[in-house]
Amino acid sequence: MSWINNTLSSSIGRKIIMAITGLFLCSFLVVHLIGNFQLFKGDGGLAFNTYSHFMSTNPMIRVAEIILVAGFAFHIYEAVVLTRRNQAARGNQKYVVSHIEQNSDWKSRNMGILGSVILVFLIVHLYNFYYRYHYEPLPFDSQNNKNLYAVVMTSFQTWWYVALYVLAQIALCYHLLHGFASGFQTLGLNHRKYTPVIKAVGYAFSIIVCAGFAAMPLYFFIFKS
Amino acid sequence: MAGSNPNAKPMNLTLKVWRQKNRNTNGQIVDYQVRDISPDMSFLEMLDVLNEDLLRKGDEPVAFDHDCREGICGSCNLFINGRAHGPEAGTTTCQLHMRKFSDGDTITIEPWRANAFPVNKDLSVDRSAFDRIIQAGGYVSVNTGGAPDGNEIPIPKEIADRAFEAATCIACGACVASCKNSSAMLFVSAKVSQLALLPQGNVERKTRVENMVAQMDKEGFGACSNIGSCAAECPVGISLENIAILNREFLSAKATSNNLA
Ligand code: HEM
Ligand code: SF4
Ligand code: FES
Protein backbone atom coordinates (compact mmCIF):
# COMPACT_ATOMS: atom_id res chain seq x y z
CA MET A 1 0.00 0.00 0.00
CA SER A 2 2.95 2.31 -0.44
CA TRP A 3 1.08 4.17 -3.19
CA ILE A 4 -1.44 5.41 -0.64
CA ASN A 5 1.34 6.52 1.64
CA ASN A 6 3.14 8.24 -1.24
CA THR A 7 -0.05 9.97 -2.34
CA LEU A 8 -0.89 11.27 1.10
CA SER A 9 2.62 12.44 1.91
CA SER A 10 3.11 14.28 -1.39
CA SER A 11 2.69 18.04 -1.37
CA ILE A 12 -0.64 17.80 -3.19
CA GLY A 13 -1.83 14.88 -1.06
CA ARG A 14 -1.19 16.81 2.13
CA LYS A 15 -3.04 19.81 0.78
CA ILE A 16 -5.97 17.60 -0.14
CA ILE A 17 -6.13 16.36 3.45
CA MET A 18 -6.09 19.98 4.65
CA ALA A 19 -8.89 20.85 2.27
CA ILE A 20 -11.12 17.88 3.15
CA THR A 21 -10.64 18.34 6.90
CA GLY A 22 -11.00 22.14 6.61
CA LEU A 23 -14.27 21.92 4.71
CA PHE A 24 -15.48 19.23 7.10
CA LEU A 25 -14.73 21.59 10.01
CA CYS A 26 -16.79 24.23 8.20
CA SER A 27 -19.77 21.89 8.25
CA PHE A 28 -19.22 21.38 11.97
CA LEU A 29 -19.30 25.14 12.47
CA VAL A 30 -22.78 25.29 10.95
CA VAL A 31 -24.17 22.65 13.28
CA HIS A 32 -22.46 24.19 16.30
CA LEU A 33 -23.76 27.65 15.44
CA ILE A 34 -27.37 26.60 14.89
CA GLY A 35 -27.42 24.60 18.14
CA ASN A 36 -25.94 27.45 20.14
CA PHE A 37 -28.47 29.94 18.82
CA GLN A 38 -30.72 28.48 21.54
CA LEU A 39 -28.76 30.67 23.95
CA PHE A 40 -30.79 33.59 22.60
CA LYS A 41 -34.13 31.94 23.32
CA GLY A 42 -34.79 33.89 26.50
CA ASP A 43 -36.06 30.85 28.43
CA GLY A 44 -33.40 31.00 31.10
CA GLY A 45 -31.39 28.37 29.21
CA LEU A 46 -33.80 25.43 29.48
CA ALA A 47 -33.73 24.59 25.75
CA PHE A 48 -29.96 25.06 25.61
CA ASN A 49 -29.42 22.77 28.59
CA THR A 50 -31.67 20.09 27.10
CA TYR A 51 -29.70 20.34 23.87
CA SER A 52 -26.40 20.11 25.76
CA HIS A 53 -27.59 17.02 27.55
CA PHE A 54 -28.56 15.42 24.24
CA MET A 55 -25.24 16.34 22.61
CA SER A 56 -23.18 14.85 25.42
CA THR A 57 -25.10 11.60 25.81
CA ASN A 58 -26.42 10.54 22.40
CA PRO A 59 -24.21 7.70 21.04
CA MET A 60 -24.41 8.98 17.43
CA ILE A 61 -23.15 12.35 18.58
CA ARG A 62 -20.30 10.71 20.50
CA VAL A 63 -19.20 8.97 17.29
CA ALA A 64 -19.42 12.26 15.40
CA GLU A 65 -17.29 13.80 18.15
CA ILE A 66 -14.51 11.30 17.50
CA ILE A 67 -14.59 12.11 13.79
CA LEU A 68 -14.50 15.79 14.65
CA VAL A 69 -11.45 15.36 16.88
CA ALA A 70 -9.75 13.40 14.11
CA GLY A 71 -10.63 16.17 11.65
CA PHE A 72 -8.96 18.77 13.85
CA ALA A 73 -5.98 16.51 14.52
CA PHE A 74 -5.29 15.86 10.83
CA HIS A 75 -5.91 19.49 9.89
CA ILE A 76 -3.46 20.73 12.51
CA TYR A 77 -0.88 18.02 11.84
CA GLU A 78 -0.82 18.71 8.10
CA ALA A 79 -0.79 22.45 8.78
CA VAL A 80 2.41 22.05 10.80
CA VAL A 81 4.10 19.71 8.30
CA LEU A 82 3.21 21.88 5.30
CA THR A 83 4.11 25.17 6.94
CA ARG A 84 7.55 23.84 7.90
CA ARG A 85 8.17 22.38 4.48
CA ASN A 86 7.08 25.60 2.81
CA GLN A 87 9.37 27.68 5.00
CA ALA A 88 12.32 25.40 4.27
CA ALA A 89 11.71 25.64 0.51
CA ARG A 90 12.86 29.27 0.43
CA GLY A 91 16.34 28.35 1.66
CA ASN A 92 18.54 30.08 4.19
CA GLN A 93 18.83 33.36 2.37
CA LYS A 94 15.55 35.28 2.40
CA TYR A 95 14.86 38.24 0.14
CA VAL A 96 16.45 41.44 1.39
CA VAL A 97 13.54 43.40 -0.08
CA SER A 98 10.18 41.74 -0.61
CA HIS A 99 6.90 43.33 -1.62
CA ILE A 100 4.72 40.26 -1.59
CA GLU A 101 1.87 42.41 -0.28
CA GLN A 102 1.62 43.88 -3.77
CA ASN A 103 0.66 40.57 -5.34
CA SER A 104 -1.32 38.70 -2.67
CA ASP A 105 -3.64 38.94 0.35
CA TRP A 106 -2.43 39.05 3.93
CA LYS A 107 -4.88 36.39 5.08
CA SER A 108 -3.77 33.88 2.47
CA ARG A 109 -0.15 34.21 3.60
CA ASN A 110 -0.93 33.92 7.31
CA MET A 111 -3.18 30.89 7.59
CA GLY A 112 -0.77 29.38 10.13
CA ILE A 113 -0.92 32.41 12.44
CA LEU A 114 -4.69 32.64 12.11
CA GLY A 115 -4.99 28.91 12.76
CA SER A 116 -2.78 29.20 15.85
CA VAL A 117 -5.05 31.88 17.32
CA ILE A 118 -7.98 29.55 16.66
CA LEU A 119 -6.10 26.71 18.38
CA VAL A 120 -5.38 28.74 21.54
CA PHE A 121 -9.02 29.72 21.65
CA LEU A 122 -10.05 26.11 21.15
CA ILE A 123 -8.06 24.93 24.16
CA VAL A 124 -9.54 27.58 26.45
CA HIS A 125 -12.99 26.96 25.00
CA LEU A 126 -12.84 23.19 25.45
CA TYR A 127 -11.58 23.48 29.00
CA ASN A 128 -14.26 25.95 29.97
CA PHE A 129 -17.28 24.26 28.46
CA TYR A 130 -16.43 20.70 27.47
CA TYR A 131 -14.17 19.73 30.36
CA ARG A 132 -16.25 21.43 33.01
CA TYR A 133 -19.49 19.99 31.64
CA HIS A 134 -18.15 16.46 31.74
CA TYR A 135 -15.82 16.44 34.71
CA GLU A 136 -16.80 19.13 37.19
CA PRO A 137 -19.87 19.25 39.43
CA LEU A 138 -22.40 21.65 37.91
CA PRO A 139 -25.75 22.88 39.28
CA PHE A 140 -28.94 21.51 37.70
CA ASP A 141 -31.73 23.51 36.13
CA SER A 142 -35.47 23.13 36.77
CA GLN A 143 -35.70 20.27 34.27
CA ASN A 144 -32.86 18.43 36.00
CA ASN A 145 -30.32 19.03 33.21
CA LYS A 146 -26.82 20.23 34.01
CA ASN A 147 -27.01 24.01 33.88
CA LEU A 148 -24.41 24.81 31.24
CA TYR A 149 -26.31 27.99 30.49
CA ALA A 150 -25.24 29.35 33.90
CA VAL A 151 -21.60 28.59 33.08
CA VAL A 152 -21.98 30.38 29.76
CA MET A 153 -23.51 33.37 31.48
CA THR A 154 -20.80 33.76 34.13
CA SER A 155 -18.02 33.20 31.58
CA PHE A 156 -19.33 35.87 29.27
CA GLN A 157 -19.55 38.42 32.06
CA THR A 158 -15.76 38.50 32.22
CA TRP A 159 -14.39 41.14 29.85
CA TRP A 160 -11.16 39.38 28.84
CA TYR A 161 -13.05 36.22 28.12
CA VAL A 162 -15.37 38.10 25.81
CA ALA A 163 -12.37 39.78 24.19
CA LEU A 164 -10.68 36.41 23.56
CA TYR A 165 -13.82 35.03 21.98
CA VAL A 166 -14.33 37.99 19.70
CA LEU A 167 -10.66 38.00 18.69
CA ALA A 168 -10.81 34.27 17.90
CA GLN A 169 -13.88 34.80 15.74
CA ILE A 170 -12.11 37.53 13.81
CA ALA A 171 -9.18 35.13 13.25
CA LEU A 172 -11.58 32.36 12.19
CA CYS A 173 -13.33 34.76 9.83
CA TYR A 174 -10.07 35.66 8.10
CA HIS A 175 -9.02 31.98 8.07
CA LEU A 176 -12.22 31.12 6.24
CA LEU A 177 -12.29 34.16 3.96
CA HIS A 178 -9.29 32.52 2.35
CA GLY A 179 -9.80 28.91 3.41
CA PHE A 180 -13.33 28.23 2.20
CA ALA A 181 -12.70 28.93 -1.48
CA SER A 182 -9.10 27.69 -1.18
CA GLY A 183 -10.35 24.27 -0.10
CA PHE A 184 -12.41 23.90 -3.27
CA GLN A 185 -9.47 25.00 -5.42
CA THR A 186 -7.22 22.44 -3.71
CA LEU A 187 -9.73 19.69 -4.47
CA GLY A 188 -9.51 20.67 -8.12
CA LEU A 189 -12.99 22.18 -8.14
CA ASN A 190 -12.27 25.26 -10.18
CA HIS A 191 -14.66 26.08 -12.97
CA ARG A 192 -15.42 29.40 -14.56
CA LYS A 193 -19.13 28.90 -13.92
CA TYR A 194 -18.95 27.86 -10.29
CA THR A 195 -15.78 29.38 -8.81
CA PRO A 196 -17.25 32.91 -8.58
CA VAL A 197 -20.25 31.40 -6.75
CA ILE A 198 -17.99 29.43 -4.38
CA LYS A 199 -16.03 32.60 -3.60
CA ALA A 200 -19.19 34.60 -2.89
CA VAL A 201 -20.65 31.83 -0.72
CA GLY A 202 -17.30 31.55 1.12
CA TYR A 203 -17.34 35.25 1.93
CA ALA A 204 -20.93 35.18 3.14
CA PHE A 205 -20.30 31.97 5.10
CA SER A 206 -17.22 33.34 6.89
CA ILE A 207 -18.88 36.58 7.88
CA ILE A 208 -22.27 35.14 8.92
CA VAL A 209 -20.81 32.22 10.90
CA CYS A 210 -18.18 34.26 12.73
CA ALA A 211 -20.54 37.16 13.43
CA GLY A 212 -23.04 34.63 14.77
CA PHE A 213 -20.51 33.12 17.18
CA ALA A 214 -19.17 36.52 18.23
CA ALA A 215 -22.73 37.70 18.96
CA MET A 216 -23.04 35.18 21.83
CA PRO A 217 -20.38 36.51 24.23
CA LEU A 218 -21.30 40.07 23.26
CA TYR A 219 -24.99 39.44 23.97
CA PHE A 220 -24.30 38.12 27.46
CA PHE A 221 -21.73 40.80 28.22
CA ILE A 222 -23.94 43.67 27.12
CA PHE A 223 -27.44 42.48 28.03
CA LYS A 224 -27.01 39.91 30.80
CA SER A 225 -24.36 41.40 33.09
CA MET B 1 4.43 51.38 -28.37
CA ALA B 2 5.85 54.86 -27.97
CA GLY B 3 9.10 55.42 -29.83
CA SER B 4 12.08 57.03 -28.20
CA ASN B 5 11.06 60.20 -26.49
CA PRO B 6 13.46 63.09 -27.17
CA ASN B 7 12.23 64.91 -24.05
CA ALA B 8 12.89 62.01 -21.68
CA LYS B 9 15.65 63.05 -19.29
CA PRO B 10 18.47 60.62 -18.52
CA MET B 11 18.38 59.27 -14.98
CA ASN B 12 20.91 58.68 -12.23
CA LEU B 13 20.19 55.67 -10.08
CA THR B 14 21.49 53.86 -7.01
CA LEU B 15 21.60 50.10 -7.46
CA LYS B 16 21.73 47.66 -4.58
CA VAL B 17 22.92 44.47 -6.22
CA TRP B 18 23.28 41.00 -4.73
CA ARG B 19 26.90 39.87 -5.25
CA GLN B 20 27.86 36.29 -4.55
CA LYS B 21 31.00 34.55 -5.74
CA ASN B 22 29.56 31.06 -6.11
CA ARG B 23 27.22 28.49 -4.66
CA ASN B 24 29.34 27.84 -1.60
CA THR B 25 29.88 31.38 -0.38
CA ASN B 26 27.51 33.85 1.23
CA GLY B 27 26.58 36.88 -0.78
CA GLN B 28 25.76 40.42 0.17
CA ILE B 29 24.20 43.56 -1.23
CA VAL B 30 26.69 45.99 -2.84
CA ASP B 31 25.78 49.58 -3.77
CA TYR B 32 26.55 51.03 -7.20
CA GLN B 33 25.73 54.30 -8.94
CA VAL B 34 24.75 54.39 -12.61
CA ARG B 35 24.50 57.69 -14.50
CA ASP B 36 22.80 58.96 -17.64
CA ILE B 37 20.40 56.05 -18.02
CA SER B 38 17.92 56.65 -20.82
CA PRO B 39 14.28 55.94 -19.92
CA ASP B 40 14.07 54.07 -23.24
CA MET B 41 16.61 51.48 -22.16
CA SER B 42 15.47 48.08 -21.03
CA PHE B 43 16.40 47.01 -17.53
CA LEU B 44 19.03 44.65 -18.93
CA GLU B 45 20.58 47.43 -21.01
CA MET B 46 20.86 49.46 -17.82
CA LEU B 47 22.74 46.54 -16.25
CA ASP B 48 24.96 46.41 -19.37
CA VAL B 49 25.87 50.04 -18.64
CA LEU B 50 26.72 49.11 -15.06
CA ASN B 51 28.88 46.21 -16.24
CA GLU B 52 30.77 48.37 -18.76
CA ASP B 53 31.52 50.81 -15.91
CA LEU B 54 32.72 47.94 -13.73
CA LEU B 55 34.93 46.54 -16.50
CA ARG B 56 36.46 49.96 -17.15
CA LYS B 57 37.35 50.17 -13.47
CA GLY B 58 38.82 46.67 -13.56
CA ASP B 59 36.03 45.24 -11.34
CA GLU B 60 34.20 41.98 -11.83
CA PRO B 61 30.98 42.53 -13.83
CA VAL B 62 27.64 41.45 -12.34
CA ALA B 63 26.58 38.02 -13.59
CA PHE B 64 22.96 37.83 -14.74
CA ASP B 65 21.18 35.52 -17.17
CA HIS B 66 19.67 36.67 -20.45
CA ASP B 67 19.33 35.33 -23.94
CA CYS B 68 16.52 36.38 -26.28
CA ARG B 69 15.85 39.81 -24.75
CA GLU B 70 12.36 39.68 -26.23
CA GLY B 71 10.35 37.91 -23.57
CA ILE B 72 10.39 34.34 -24.87
CA CYS B 73 13.33 32.43 -23.42
CA GLY B 74 12.62 32.96 -19.73
CA SER B 75 16.22 33.39 -18.65
CA CYS B 76 16.35 37.07 -17.56
CA ASN B 77 15.29 36.38 -14.01
CA LEU B 78 15.77 39.23 -11.57
CA PHE B 79 13.95 40.05 -8.35
CA ILE B 80 13.64 43.81 -8.58
CA ASN B 81 12.51 45.97 -5.66
CA GLY B 82 10.86 43.01 -4.00
CA ARG B 83 9.00 41.74 -7.08
CA ALA B 84 9.78 39.03 -9.64
CA HIS B 85 10.69 40.79 -12.91
CA GLY B 86 10.11 44.16 -11.25
CA PRO B 87 7.06 46.37 -10.74
CA GLU B 88 5.29 45.92 -14.07
CA ALA B 89 2.77 43.08 -14.42
CA GLY B 90 2.96 40.69 -17.36
CA THR B 91 6.57 41.35 -18.36
CA THR B 92 9.92 39.67 -18.17
CA THR B 93 12.91 41.72 -17.03
CA CYS B 94 14.14 42.19 -20.60
CA GLN B 95 10.78 43.81 -21.45
CA LEU B 96 10.87 46.11 -18.45
CA HIS B 97 11.83 49.63 -19.41
CA MET B 98 13.67 52.19 -17.34
CA ARG B 99 10.79 54.64 -17.85
CA LYS B 100 9.07 52.70 -15.06
CA PHE B 101 11.64 54.24 -12.70
CA SER B 102 12.48 57.85 -11.82
CA ASP B 103 15.66 59.83 -11.54
CA GLY B 104 17.26 59.33 -8.11
CA ASP B 105 15.54 55.98 -7.42
CA THR B 106 17.22 53.22 -5.46
CA ILE B 107 16.68 49.80 -7.05
CA THR B 108 17.38 46.56 -5.20
CA ILE B 109 18.23 43.61 -7.46
CA GLU B 110 18.34 40.05 -6.12
CA PRO B 111 18.42 36.56 -7.61
CA TRP B 112 15.43 34.18 -7.42
CA ARG B 113 15.48 32.65 -3.98
CA ALA B 114 14.54 29.01 -3.54
CA ASN B 115 16.36 26.01 -2.18
CA ALA B 116 15.73 24.30 -5.50
CA PHE B 117 17.34 27.20 -7.43
CA PRO B 118 20.87 27.55 -6.01
CA VAL B 119 22.73 30.74 -6.92
CA ASN B 120 25.46 30.14 -9.53
CA LYS B 121 26.92 33.58 -9.19
CA ASP B 122 25.53 37.05 -8.32
CA LEU B 123 22.09 37.20 -9.94
CA SER B 124 22.31 33.98 -11.92
CA VAL B 125 20.58 30.92 -10.50
CA ASP B 126 20.55 27.26 -11.53
CA ARG B 127 17.06 26.35 -12.73
CA SER B 128 17.92 22.82 -13.84
CA ALA B 129 15.35 21.56 -11.30
CA PHE B 130 12.76 22.64 -13.88
CA ASP B 131 14.53 20.61 -16.57
CA ARG B 132 14.44 17.53 -14.37
CA ILE B 133 10.71 18.00 -13.76
CA ILE B 134 10.11 18.22 -17.52
CA GLN B 135 12.30 15.16 -18.10
CA ALA B 136 10.17 13.29 -15.57
CA GLY B 137 7.07 13.59 -17.74
CA GLY B 138 6.63 16.83 -19.67
CA TYR B 139 6.76 15.18 -23.09
CA VAL B 140 4.58 13.14 -25.45
CA SER B 141 5.40 10.00 -27.40
CA VAL B 142 5.32 10.48 -31.16
CA ASN B 143 5.26 7.71 -33.73
CA THR B 144 8.03 7.68 -36.26
CA GLY B 145 7.13 7.48 -39.93
CA GLY B 146 5.45 9.95 -42.24
CA ALA B 147 4.29 13.28 -40.88
CA PRO B 148 0.60 13.09 -39.86
CA ASP B 149 -2.00 15.19 -41.64
CA GLY B 150 -2.46 18.61 -40.12
CA ASN B 151 -6.10 18.10 -39.15
CA GLU B 152 -6.08 14.37 -38.61
CA ILE B 153 -6.91 14.70 -34.91
CA PRO B 154 -9.85 17.04 -34.42
CA ILE B 155 -9.48 19.32 -31.39
CA PRO B 156 -12.20 21.83 -30.52
CA LYS B 157 -10.92 25.38 -30.82
CA GLU B 158 -11.80 26.23 -27.23
CA ILE B 159 -9.69 23.31 -25.97
CA ALA B 160 -6.86 24.11 -28.35
CA ASP B 161 -6.88 27.72 -27.09
CA ARG B 162 -6.74 26.68 -23.45
CA ALA B 163 -3.92 24.23 -24.14
CA PHE B 164 -2.09 26.93 -26.03
CA GLU B 165 -2.49 29.36 -23.15
CA ALA B 166 -0.93 26.80 -20.81
CA ALA B 167 1.81 26.12 -23.35
CA THR B 168 2.94 29.75 -23.32
CA CYS B 169 4.80 29.14 -20.03
CA ILE B 170 8.41 30.13 -20.64
CA ALA B 171 9.75 28.28 -17.57
CA CYS B 172 11.18 31.49 -16.15
CA GLY B 173 10.54 30.50 -12.52
CA ALA B 174 8.92 33.80 -11.48
CA CYS B 175 6.15 31.74 -9.92
CA VAL B 176 8.65 30.00 -7.63
CA ALA B 177 10.50 33.24 -6.92
CA SER B 178 7.40 35.18 -5.93
CA CYS B 179 5.67 32.41 -3.98
CA LYS B 180 5.96 32.60 -0.21
CA ASN B 181 6.37 28.80 -0.26
CA SER B 182 8.74 28.70 -3.26
CA SER B 183 6.19 26.42 -4.86
CA ALA B 184 6.56 25.29 -8.46
CA MET B 185 2.91 24.34 -8.80
CA LEU B 186 2.06 26.96 -11.41
CA PHE B 187 4.90 25.85 -13.67
CA VAL B 188 4.11 22.15 -13.26
CA SER B 189 0.38 22.76 -13.68
CA ALA B 190 0.92 24.66 -16.92
CA LYS B 191 2.73 21.71 -18.47
CA VAL B 192 0.41 19.05 -17.04
CA SER B 193 -2.79 20.79 -18.09
CA GLN B 194 -1.46 21.65 -21.54
CA LEU B 195 -0.84 17.97 -22.23
CA ALA B 196 -3.93 16.73 -20.36
CA LEU B 197 -6.16 18.91 -22.52
CA LEU B 198 -4.82 17.51 -25.79
CA PRO B 199 -5.38 14.00 -27.19
CA GLN B 200 -1.65 13.75 -27.97
CA GLY B 201 -0.98 13.79 -24.22
CA ASN B 202 -3.22 10.85 -23.48
CA VAL B 203 -0.67 8.05 -23.70
CA GLU B 204 1.37 9.20 -20.71
CA ARG B 205 -1.47 11.06 -19.01
CA LYS B 206 -1.29 9.23 -15.66
CA THR B 207 2.43 8.57 -15.39
CA ARG B 208 3.18 12.15 -16.44
CA VAL B 209 1.41 13.81 -13.54
CA GLU B 210 2.59 11.21 -11.03
CA ASN B 211 6.22 11.52 -12.07
CA MET B 212 6.28 15.29 -12.46
CA VAL B 213 4.75 15.86 -9.02
CA ALA B 214 7.15 13.33 -7.47
CA GLN B 215 10.10 15.13 -9.06
CA MET B 216 8.74 18.53 -8.00
CA ASP B 217 8.58 17.33 -4.38
CA LYS B 218 12.01 15.72 -4.59
CA GLU B 219 13.57 18.98 -5.78
CA GLY B 220 12.37 20.62 -2.56
CA PHE B 221 9.79 23.08 -3.89
CA GLY B 222 7.04 24.03 -1.43
CA ALA B 223 3.34 23.19 -1.58
CA CYS B 224 0.62 25.48 -2.88
CA SER B 225 -1.36 27.58 -0.37
CA ASN B 226 -3.52 29.13 -3.10
CA ILE B 227 -2.03 32.53 -2.35
CA GLY B 228 -1.88 33.61 -5.99
CA SER B 229 1.41 35.56 -6.04
CA CYS B 230 2.57 33.25 -8.84
CA ALA B 231 -0.28 34.01 -11.23
CA ALA B 232 -0.05 37.72 -10.41
CA GLU B 233 3.67 37.78 -11.29
CA CYS B 234 3.68 35.31 -14.20
CA PRO B 235 4.86 37.21 -17.28
CA VAL B 236 2.56 35.24 -19.59
CA GLY B 237 -0.49 35.11 -17.34
CA ILE B 238 -0.74 31.37 -16.56
CA SER B 239 -3.86 31.15 -14.37
CA LEU B 240 -4.59 29.37 -11.09
CA GLU B 241 -7.20 27.27 -12.85
CA ASN B 242 -4.27 25.17 -14.09
CA ILE B 243 -3.34 24.28 -10.51
CA ALA B 244 -6.85 22.95 -9.94
CA ILE B 245 -6.48 20.89 -13.12
CA LEU B 246 -3.13 19.59 -11.85
CA ASN B 247 -4.67 18.54 -8.53
CA ARG B 248 -7.55 16.77 -10.32
CA GLU B 249 -5.15 15.02 -12.68
CA PHE B 250 -2.96 13.97 -9.77
CA LEU B 251 -5.85 12.59 -7.71
CA SER B 252 -7.42 10.67 -10.55
CA ALA B 253 -4.05 9.30 -11.70
CA LYS B 254 -3.18 8.16 -8.18
CA ALA B 255 -6.57 6.53 -7.78
CA THR B 256 -6.59 4.70 -11.11
CA SER B 257 -3.05 4.14 -12.38
CA ASN B 258 -1.42 0.72 -12.26
CA ASN B 259 1.55 2.16 -10.44
CA LEU B 260 1.78 0.61 -6.97
CA ALA B 261 4.81 2.61 -5.82
C1 HEM C 1 -12.82 25.46 13.03
C2 HEM C 1 -11.58 25.55 12.77
C3 HEM C 1 -10.97 25.55 11.37
C4 HEM C 1 -11.55 25.55 10.13
C5 HEM C 1 -13.03 25.55 9.80
C6 HEM C 1 -10.48 25.56 9.15
C7 HEM C 1 -10.67 25.56 7.79
C8 HEM C 1 -9.67 25.59 6.86
C9 HEM C 1 -9.84 25.52 5.43
C10 HEM C 1 -11.18 25.34 4.71
C11 HEM C 1 -8.61 25.62 4.85
C12 HEM C 1 -8.29 25.61 3.35
C13 HEM C 1 -7.62 24.35 2.92
C14 HEM C 1 -6.95 24.53 1.58
O1 HEM C 1 -6.36 25.57 1.31
O2 HEM C 1 -7.00 23.61 0.77
C15 HEM C 1 -7.66 25.77 5.91
C16 HEM C 1 -6.30 25.94 5.71
C17 HEM C 1 -5.38 26.03 6.73
N1 HEM C 1 -5.63 25.86 8.09
FE1 HEM C 1 -7.45 25.70 8.93
N2 HEM C 1 -9.28 25.56 9.81
C18 HEM C 1 -9.54 25.54 11.16
C19 HEM C 1 -8.60 25.49 12.18
C20 HEM C 1 -7.24 25.52 11.99
C21 HEM C 1 -6.25 25.37 13.04
C22 HEM C 1 -6.56 25.14 14.51
C23 HEM C 1 -5.03 25.48 12.42
C24 HEM C 1 -3.61 25.42 12.97
C25 HEM C 1 -3.21 25.32 14.14
C26 HEM C 1 -5.24 25.69 11.02
C27 HEM C 1 -4.24 25.88 10.09
C28 HEM C 1 -4.42 26.00 8.73
C29 HEM C 1 -3.37 26.27 7.79
C30 HEM C 1 -1.89 26.50 8.09
C31 HEM C 1 -3.97 26.29 6.52
C32 HEM C 1 -3.29 26.57 5.19
C33 HEM C 1 -2.59 25.39 4.64
C34 HEM C 1 -1.92 25.75 3.34
O3 HEM C 1 -2.59 26.25 2.43
O4 HEM C 1 -0.71 25.54 3.21
N3 HEM C 1 -6.59 25.70 10.78
N4 HEM C 1 -8.31 25.75 7.13
S1 SF4 D 1 4.12 29.60 -14.93
FE1 SF4 D 1 4.60 31.73 -15.50
S2 SF4 D 1 5.99 32.41 -13.88
FE2 SF4 D 1 5.95 30.17 -13.77
S3 SF4 D 1 7.66 29.47 -15.03
FE3 SF4 D 1 5.86 29.52 -16.39
S4 SF4 D 1 5.93 31.57 -17.32
FE4 SF4 D 1 7.32 31.66 -15.57
S1 FES E 1 16.05 37.45 -22.05
FE1 FES E 1 14.68 35.94 -22.89
S2 FES E 1 12.86 36.35 -21.77
FE2 FES E 1 14.14 37.97 -21.15
Image (spheres, rainbow, N blue to C red):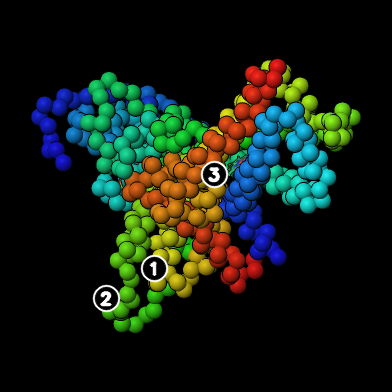
Which residue is identified by label 1? B198
Which residue is identified by label 3? A180
- The CA distance from mark 3 to mark 1 is 31 Å
Q: In the rendered view, tell whether residue B185 sits above or below residue B110.
A: below
Is the CB–ligand 1 distance for label 3 below 8 Å? yes
Q: Nearer the viewer, mark 2 or mark 3?
A: 3
Q: Residue drawn at (71%, 22%), measured in percent from left and top?
A: A156
Residue at mark 1: chain: B
Number of numbered labels in the structure image: 3
Q: Is residue A95 visible?
A: yes
B142 lies left or right of B49? right
Residue toward you, B97 or A6: A6
Question: Looking at this rendering, what residue extends furthest in the right direction?
Answer: A137
Callout 2 secondary element: loop
Which residue is identified by label 2? B150
Could you say where residue B218 lies in the image, as x and y percent from the top left?
A: 57, 53
Give the amino acid at mark 3.
Phe
Could you say where residue A51 lies in the image, as x and y percent from the top left?
A: 76, 40
